Image (cartoon, rainbow, N blue to C red):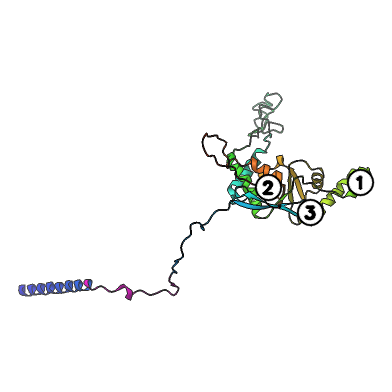
Amino acid sequence: MASKGVKGLNEALRSLSISSQTCREAASHRIKPSIFTRSMATEVPLPRNTAPVNAEASYQPVTTVPLTIFNFPSFEPQRLESWSAKHLHLPLRRDILHLAVIYEGDNTRQGTASTKTRWEVAGSHKKMRPQKGTGHARLGTRQSPMLRGGGKVFGPKPRDFGTKITRKVYDLAWRTALSYRYRRGELVVCQDGMELPLPDEFTALVAGGELQEDLQRSFKARWVRQVLDANEWGRRNGRSTFITTDYRENLYEALNEEPNYGRALDIEDVDVKDLLETGRLVVEREALKELIQRHQSDLVTRVFVSDAALPRMPESGKVLVE
């Protein structure tokens, strides 16, 4: 029995040596990887670009944009000017516009709502009825908030709803709104002194005192409707906002009679929200330049440094074609 056990052990060891030798031979014999690879149907060799790279022909950002100056109300082009891209060609930033509109809305709230507490209501503070014995609920003074005419619990008091925003961010929002209008072709710049011309017959009748004020207002309203519809600035094409440097009597009075066609604003009454509300902006050239000069604090430094090259203010308004 012992000899059979030793014989079986020898055979097992011999088989293990053979299997290990076979594994070593298989490991030494490597299969080429190209046998198991297959080409994709959409595989295309990449083209070799042997053309020399020109550093001067690389991308350069836009520095100026063209701006056409029109005549009002004929809408005839008068000249072509070059304006800085930092003024009228900024990318759209909805977050900055949202901050500016919220800032303006918060600062226009009056915050004058006020109510009286029970300690501010006039009257005697004597207990109205005994604590017990009447069969009714317990009741204190006449100023109790539970009674009509009593004080208000947690009522509003005068407060300031105003919020703050960085001036540079606010100025950037102004130019972003103007750039948004410019990109969409909704910024119409007219010559200075934009006024609504009236017919000579109407002017003669007004000078002679033959027209009452009601007839004058109705005629101006009808006349401004015809002018805006002729230029496709009227109600069908979206209301228009006219921005001038000074009060224009005919234009302002006519648009006050027709608020559905547009509105006229002085340069001092314009906000960022006004630039985004209506269908288009019709601005005087001088008014546009004044708005940009007021809101470019993030472009021009106000710190004087001696013997230093300070950044120059972007130039706008250079005449290209006249």
Q: Which mark is residue 204?
A: 1
Question: Which sits earlier in the primary sequence, circle 2 or circle 1?
Answer: 1
Q: Looking at the picture, how far across and down is residue 297, in whole percent?
A: 59, 40
Q: Which residues are magenta?
A: 28-45
Secondary structure of the residue carrying tag 2 is helix
| Residue under pointer 2 | 275
Q: Which mark is residue 243?
A: none
Dot in front, 2 or 3:
3
Secondary structure of the residue carrying tag 1 is helix
Q: Main secondary structure of the magenta part?
A: loop
Question: Which sits earlier in the primary sequence, circle 1 or circle 3?
Answer: 3
Question: Dot 2 surroundings within 10 Å: few (below 14), some, or many (20 or more)?
Answer: some
Q: Which mark is residue 74?
A: 3
State the image quarter where residue 112 is shown.
top right
Residue at (48% x, 59% y) in the render: 54
Q: Is residue 205 visible?
A: yes
36 or 322, which lies in front? 322
237 or 48, which lies in front? 48
Task: State whether residue 217 is above or below residue 229.
Answer: above
